[in-house]
Image: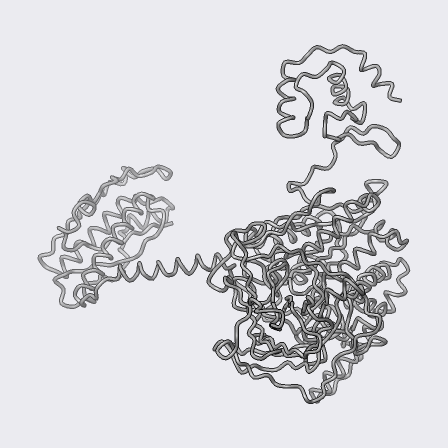
Amino acid sequence: MFPALETELKQETLPDPYEDFMYRHLRYYGYFKGPTCLSSTVRRQIEAVSRGSLLLSSPLLKSRQLLHNDFGEVNPRLREPRDLFAFLPSSGPLQAPRWPIECEVIKENIHHIEWIPPQPEYFYQPTGNEKVPEIVGEEEGTVVYQLDSVPTEGSYFTSSRVGGKRGIIKDLAVTLQGPEDNALLFESRFESGNLQKAVRVDTYEYELTLRTDLYTNKYTQWFYFRVQNTRKDATYRFTIVNLLKPKSLYTLGMKPLMYSQLDADTHNIGWRREGSEIKYCKSSTGDGQQPFYCLTWTIQFPHDQDTCFFAHFYPYTYTDLQCYLLSVANNPVQAQFCKLRTLCRSLAGNIVYLLTITNPSRTPQEAAAKKAVVLSARVHPGESNGSWIMKGFLDFILSDSPDAQLLRNIFVFKVVPMLNPDGVIVGNSRCSLAGRDLNRHYKTILKDSFPCIWYTRNMIKRLLEEREVLLYCDFHGHSRKNNIFLYGCNNNDRKYWLHERVFPLMLSKNAPDKFSFHSCNFKVQRCKEGTGRVVMWRMGILNSYTMESTFGGSTLGNKRDTHFTTEDLKSLGHQVCDTLLDFCDPDRAKFMQCLEELKELLQQEIHKKFNELGQDMELEGNWSDISLSDIESSTSGSDSSLSDGLPAHLLNIARELNKKKRLYKKKKKKPLQTRKQRNEQYQKNSLMREFKLTDVAERAGFASTLQKPHAFSRNSKNTSSSMVRNEKPRLNESQLNARDKDTSLDPSNVTALILSQSKERTQREKPGFTASCSAKRSTNRSQEPARDMKPSWSRNRYPVAKRGRATLTVYPSLHVYTYP
């Protein structure tokens, strides 16, 4: 089959003295697993392969570097280099998540099944009988669960390890006194869990406190915890007492999510919306700096002695992502067009994955012509709905659908499915372990503090150098508005006017019951300059978006007043792919139709705006010149100033430095001086400055004009009279003639003239004053140096000024001039 191999095997080769060393070297690093002394046949095989004649099949070497081309010919080139970090092994366990060393983690593996409710889950309709809770607190209640060590503001991330905190993990729940004890057992020390404290204020009533994002004192929205020892016939009330947002979808009918382990095991039922008497209101407690808000609801558990979970939204953990990517990596068909790589490591050392999805191109020209699409999710860890949309997108683009194949033929997809794995693992709502919102730091230069964002931006920057990026979209969740919508960036180029709004309008037509175009906003606010969409837009990506998916549900079409399920979110990922095909259709009919609709909608919006202002305006010819930013309102999002600034560890360093600086200034503080002491110090400083300038001027050959006339006398009764006026010395006739003839004056003559006049003036004003500096004036013009010759002045003309300043009483002022 390989005649070239047979010929080469017949050739005898001499042993190489360096060969034995190399085999030992390869065996040490795991690339060779045979004996050091090889047989001549094996040696000849290796040498033949090194000349590119065959794809190595010897079991002694792990390396499989040579490749075949599409015609079966040997292609002597190396494969793509292996990743620096090993991940997703085809056999064996996944890489365990790394936790900060302060976090306690239980050993149980939490897993939930996916389930689609057979009936729509409608919003809660208030009855008017909802109870406003009175917060009791642990003073009158009983603490049944509390985390011992929670890193908050003032501390910062230092290191991590698999399993978190070392030592024995204590059981934080209360100890049951017997089978009749009906106290609930709480737990949240698992992946993405968030509950800091539970206080039992009545038999079936509990007050819950959420943990803020690690190393901060802010952001309490995401909750996810477990309860055990339930009773079926009892009505329980739960009240979360330390929420921070004044507005919430719970006021619009959103219900919490509940998961029953017995229902999942026996009836294959997963997460479902449950709860009654739901109320979101301002709390009577606070921390003195910001008010707290509380969420209360009642629930009846379906079974006795059940294990149940509650969550703000459908959880999607880092382990869930790894399991999904493992299935993709082990699929031989998908592995042909989906390359899984490590983008970087997070602060805690967890892998940030990067997927490159595209069909192999037949020619280099075809590969270079492909445009790119960049998608990312979970920069905010508590917005798990972004992961479900991302999963739907990946399910479609990795499928064998004709539309998916077409998309892979014309695009290169770069996908970062989880930008903030550390925050997802520890159960944060918004921040990374740096204690900052990553979606405000896309312009950062702090690679070590924000590695996930820095490497993502750098990857996109390199991608823009290779090819055009058609679209960038970052998947998020929204806590105050229903439906799904996009935030974009108004384009200032009149050539592409309104083009950034075409894709959202097309998506609203493809998903009319989920996506709301009227909720989209394209205003670029100054406080959002550090967000992903604005930074990518300024890097040159016209269609740069943030996709906001509600935690609640839809108010549109057939899904009106119903909660979104995971299937709804995954279907939107499919529809993003459909919209991409419509957006890039060679037949531009759909695109132009959307542009015309956008112009009409904009005209209507302008008329509405002017009617609200009580003004009339004719929009015949110049209506398109109106700034779109003036029409749109600001986007309703989080206050970026709350999470802007240095990361927590650098902020702590800055605080320590400022503290030391204040202590140093306090120790070095000088006593107050009298007026006489200040005058004497001022004279000393002036004299020091005077002779420094003189010395500099001498060294530079009078290259610059120094006109700082200061002369002081200690015997002077009036300080102002001691200052010598800034008067230019008068030149004699011969010097003026020399200047007129464009001949250079001798610098030493000029200096002598200045010193002589200064001495005479000083003696005239102050009889008895003797100047220590004297110079003889030369009148011999024949001794003038040439124009380009440097004068040979003494470097130490005034040695007294350098050696014994304390013995001097006063000095004359030196006026140094250079003439053109």
Q: Residue at x 77, y 65 (%)?
A: 566
Q: Residue at x 69, y 50 (%)?
A: 353
Q: Residue at x 79, y 75 (%)?
A: 121
Q: Where is residue 346 in the image (x, y as percent from the top left)?
A: 60, 52
Q: In this view, does 493 lie above or below 329?
A: below
**Is residue 526 in sight in this rendering?**
no
Q: Where is residue 805 in the image (x, y as percent from the top left)?
A: 17, 50
Q: Where is residue 409 in the image (x, y as percent from the top left)?
A: 85, 49
**Colour option used:** one colour
Q: In which quarter of the image is residue 611?
A: bottom right
Q: How many marks?
A: 0
Q: Which of 269 and 122 is in front in this view?
A: 269
Q: Where is residue 155 in the image (x, y as percent from the top left)?
A: 47, 60
Q: In this view, does 651 lie above or below 328?
A: below
Q: In this view, does 693 lie above or below 427?
A: above
**Is residue 407 in sight in this rendering?**
yes
Left or right: residue 551 versus residue 333 is left
